[in-house]
Every structure is written in structure tokens, then in C-alpha cells.
Amino acid sequence: MGIFKKRKKSNKIEFSEYNNKEKGGKNRSSLLTSFDRMEYSIVTENSKETLLKICDTILSGKAVLANFDKLDPEDANEMLPFISGVVYATRGEIYRLDERLFLFGRKEEFEDGSLYQYVEDTK
């Protein structure tokens, strides 16, 4: 008996890089709209880790819908200028959808129009 056990065959389907591409070599993940790729964040603490996570998500090419309801207004006011600076540096846009609900995104995320449609639908 060896160290490694023999694996049972599973019915699990694995997608290769080939399967994730359609004709012409385009990635299927590019078919998702910016709204589909958007991340929702409930901000509960004013920490460097939370702040950088939101900013890294924006810089990675995803819009962020951030809810600051569970945070003191003073703490939210400390975080918003930094996040706004990241959005400004990427020529992005910020929308205030509610008193403590903000949509942050780079310019590229707004190009397909799905985020603009979301903003209009929330009014």
C-alpha cells in the first residue's frame, strides 16, 4: 500500500481554458456586464484592511456597491475621501444611491452602460 490513495472517478466536470473561450478566442467571462461582476460590500469597520480591499476590488476592474450603514458617520467620512481618490485616479465615477450607499467604479466599468442602468433603476 502506497502513500497516495487511488482516486475514485467523479462526475465532476472541469472547464479548461479552451472550454471557457468561444469562437474567435474571446473569453466567455468578458460576456458578463459590469453589473454582473459588481461586488457588494457591507462596511462594518474602519480599518486599513477593509479600505484597501475595497480599493483593490475597484482597481482590479470590478465596480463596488458599498453600504456604510453599519459604520459610524465619522468613520465613513474618513474612508470616503481615500476611495474617492482611487476612483478619481482611474477617471471613474461615484454615485450616491442612498444616504449611506455608494457605487464606485473605474471609467471602463461604466462603458457598457449596465451600471448607468442600475443607477437609473434605483432612483
Image (cartoon, rainbow, N blue to C red):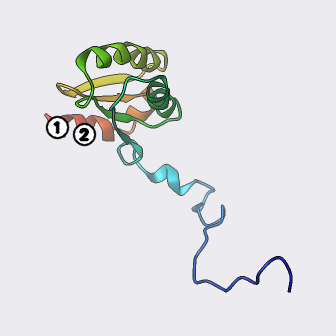
Q: Amino acid at mark 1?
A: Thr
**Callout 2: 10 Å neighbours few (<14), some, many (20+)?**
few
**Callout 1: 10 Å neighbours few (<14), some, many (20+)?**
few
Q: Which residue is mark 2?
A: 118
Viewer-nearest residue: 76 or 57: 76
In the image, residue 10 lies at what x, y percent? 61, 83
Q: Residue at x 37, y 48 (%)?
A: 36
Q: Is residue 32 above or below residue 100?
A: below
Q: Quadrant of residue 119?
A: top left
Q: Which mark is residue 122?
A: 1
Viewer-nearest residue: 100 or 96: 100
Q: Residue at x 38, y 32 (%)?
A: 110
Q: Which mark is residue 55?
A: none
Q: Residue at x 43, y 14 (%)?
A: 85
Name the quadrant of the C terminus.
top left
Viewer-nearest residue: 59 or 75: 75
Q: Amino acid at mark 2?
A: Tyr
Which structural element holds mark 2? helix
Q: Are marks 2 and 1 in contact (CB under 8 Å)?
A: yes
Q: Residue furthest right?
A: 2
Cα separation between marks 2 and 1: 6 Å
Q: Residue at x 48, y 22 (%)?
A: 48
Numbered-mark total: 2
In the image, residue 18 lies at what x, y percent? 66, 64
Q: Quadrant of residue 67?
A: top left
Q: Is residue 42 left or right of residue 91?
A: left
Which structural element holds mark 1? helix
In the image, residue 64 lies at what x, y percent? 38, 34
Q: Is residue 36 above or below residue 110?
A: below
Name the quadrant of the N terminus.
bottom right
Viewer-nearest residue: 59 or 6: 6
